[in-house]
Amino acid sequence: MSVEIISYGEAEDNTTTEDLEKALMVAAADADARNEPIESTSSKSPRPSEPKHQPLQNSSISNSSLKRCSDGEKKESPKKRKISEDISTSGEGYANVVASHYNQIEEKGLQERSKSRIVFLRNFHNWIKSMLINEYLSKIKLKKKYNAPLRVLDIGCGKGGDLLKWKKANITHLICSDIAAVSLEQCKNRYSDMKERSARDRNGGNLYTIEYISADCSRVRLREKYSDPSVKLDIVSCQFAFHYSFESLPQAECMLRNVGECLQAGGYFIGTIPDANDLVARAKRENSNTYGNDVYKVLLDFDVNKPPLFGAKYNFYLDGVVDCPEFLVHFPTFIKLAKKYGLKLVKKEKFYDFFNTMKREGSKLLSNMSSLETYPPFPQCTMVGSAEDDYVHAERFLSEITTNDGGRNNVRLGTLSKSEWEASSLYLTFAFEKVKNTWNADGTPCYEI
């Protein structure tokens, strides 16, 4: 069953509420038609204090078959999704493909990674994540008492690339979750190494405690796997991973439920995803479902003129880093579904806009992380880009700041190659805030968003 939405590749505001609600109704019916029941993975009975979530507010689909991934009641029919159970693994979709892909990625040392064609792109994206994390943890700290605990859930933690970021942020406890078991083991090893170094270093400070969950967060209820199911989270971070949940409506809802369920009011859900509009718009401009350059390549596996709301699959290749199925995230749908779990959009910015906003504040970190390539290069140094026009923009900028006394030879700037900028500009950052709720007569939470 095709579920189409009209605004991919255009201004997302063009999608009317009525259009979106109709599309979501069809998506819900499609999920039910595919018979995606919930299979219990826990013998625990639901906690009486755990309320059901309010359906979408002011929506014609509030009484339709559009459900969350779970509901908290005993099973009555295959189509009712319950709060303490997981999405059936009988229709795993591309989950195994994604997990297998990341499990097979070889762990490389720092020296080997420094030889990569996209070393500066990687570092730049790490800077983006660092600044995003710092921005919202700073907001949290302003709301809390001095030295109050800071608890974080990292969904799609991978090999633990952000472990050091959390250490520098002085958090108290971290929950790491990932679909790839091998990656999670590498994350454990990184944490162990970091803990040993911290113990040897007098100025190492206190290292946060940690727990690990190997699970598909778009199919499994994480709360049942926490060491403390009553934990109150301050930040939920999902970097370059949320878009995998848009394979289907039940998966997207299950993911957002995991985000919002233990996130306390005033906490933030932050992350980074590819921009669906840009992915489709570039295909339309190129008049081809395949496009890219020497750094990245995209292959869209759907009709760009009639893309589905969920399951809009594409393959993204980034210089050997990622080459597995991903899915478009229709942002108005993201916003609407997030409201069901008390998540209100605070900010959405393309990477280049986020960079322009934060570059002055984060200039020192940009340098420390080697996030930009020096142009022109120092003697005996080679630029990573090889395309003829990779540094035309840098040369043009230098020409504009040339002084009459010939000072140009002493001027150097930090940049990414044009090929890397084209890849990086596909991404955006987002931040949602968990709002306070009131309670309906039937015990369900109601969010004013």
Image (cartoon, rainbow, N blue to C red):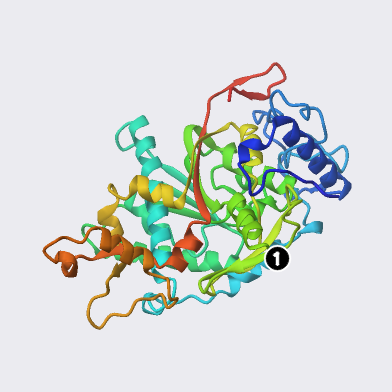
- Badge 1 amino acid: Asn
Outermost bottom residue: 380
Residue 435 vertical placement versus 402 (above, below): above
Q: Which one is nearer the viewer's eye here, 331 or 340?
A: 331
What residue is shown at x 63% (from left), y 39% (from top)?
A: 332
Q: Which one is nearer the viewer's eye here, 295 or 409?
A: 409
Q: Position of residue 50 (x, y in %)?
A: 65, 31
Q: Give the side of residue 360 with respect to residue 23, left or right.
A: left
The answer to whether residue 75 is visible is yes
Q: Position of residue 83 (x, y in %)?
A: 71, 39
Residue 67 vertical placement versus 197 (above, below): above
Q: Secondary structure at mark 1?
A: helix
Q: Which one is nearer the viewer's eye here, 169 or 94?
A: 94
Q: Position of residue 346 (x, y in %)?
A: 49, 35
Report which quarter residue 79 is drawn in. Answer: top right
Q: Position of residue 273 (x, y in %)?
A: 55, 52
Q: Give the side of residue 232 with respect to residue 370, left or right.
A: right
What residue is shown at x 38% (from left), y 51% (from top)?
A: 355
Query: In the rendered image, which quarter contains the C terminus?
Result: top right
The answer to whether residue 205 is visible is no
Outermost front residue: 404
Q: Which residue is mark 1?
A: 96
Circle 1 crowding by C-alpha within 10 Å: few under 14, some 14–19, many from 20: few
Outermost top residue: 441
Report which quarter residue 200 is drawn in. Answer: bottom left
Q: Which one is nearer the viewer's eye here, 270 or 308?
A: 308
How many marks can you see? 1
Residue 238 vertical placement versus 234 (above, below): below
Outermost left residue: 405
Residue 268 vertical placement versus 308 (above, below): above
What residue is shown at x 68% (from left), y 50% (from top)?
A: 246
